[in-house]
């Protein structure tokens, strides 16, 4: 199984998708390799002012330098992040812990969408 770059999750009942972690753009949902996942939309205005960047530059950061890459400080591949964490790298461990926490929250929401009963969880 591989989760990380381009990850999403979907609740399926009787062959029909009834819920998903995806939103209007790829920024919504799960943390990905370089994408932040769901965040408060006000972060764009806040970060723009705090970092003296245009909103477009902040959006570029959220799409290309956030997620696992930003949290781990340099890697967007979960395999490399796991290797780093096993060597004691705290930034890599934080990226793993945050990814798992956010994934678990989304999975629970999808289970509720399925009527609180699931037959399988497939990665």
Image (tube, helix red, strand yellow):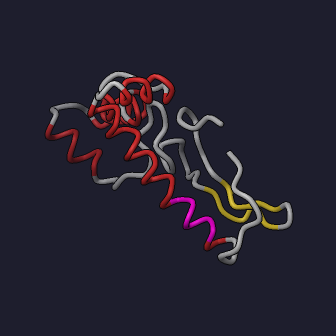
Q: Which residue is drawn at 69% across and 56% down?
A: 121
Residue at position x 25%, y 33% from top? Answer: 54
Q: Is residue 80 above or below residue 95?
A: above
Residue at point 63% right, 51% down? 9
Q: Position of residue 64 (x, y in %)?
A: 41, 27
Relative horizontal placement of residue 22, taking residue 27 as reference (left or right) = right
Quadrant into which the C terminus falls = top right
Q: Is residue 112 magenta?
A: no
Could you tell whether 45 is left or right of 21 in the image?
A: left
- Residue 122 vertical placement versus 59 (above, below): below
**x then y, percent, for residue 114:** 70, 71
Which span of residues is magenta-colored?
106-111
Check the image and name the residue furthest to the bottom: 115
Tell me: residue 48, above or below residue 65.
below
**In this rendering, position of residue 42 left or right of residue 36:** left
Secondary structure mostly seen in magenta is helix
User: Where does the N terminus fall, quadrant-wise?
Assistant: top right
Residue 14 figure quarter? bottom right
Residue 34 rendering spot, x and y as whole percentages: 44, 31
Q: Quick one: 54 or 43, which is closer to the camera?
A: 43
Q: Position of residue 25 (x, y in %)?
A: 53, 44
């Amino acid at each position: 199984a591989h989760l990380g770059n381009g990850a999403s999750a979907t609740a399926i009942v009787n062959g029909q998708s009834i819920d998903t972690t995806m939103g209007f753009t790829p920024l919504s949902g799960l943390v990905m390799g370089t994408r932040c996942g769901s965040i408060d939309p006000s972060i764009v205005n806040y970060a723009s002012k705090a970092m003296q960047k245009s909103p477009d530059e902040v959006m570029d950061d959220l799409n290309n330098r956030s997620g696992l890459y930003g949290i781990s400080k340099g890697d967007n591949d979960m395999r490399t992040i796991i290797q780093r964490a096993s060597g004691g790298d705290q930034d890599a461990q934080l990226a793993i812990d945050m990814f798992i926490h956010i994934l678990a929250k989304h999975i629970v929401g999808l289970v509720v969408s399925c009527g609180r009963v699931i037959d399988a969880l497939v990665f």
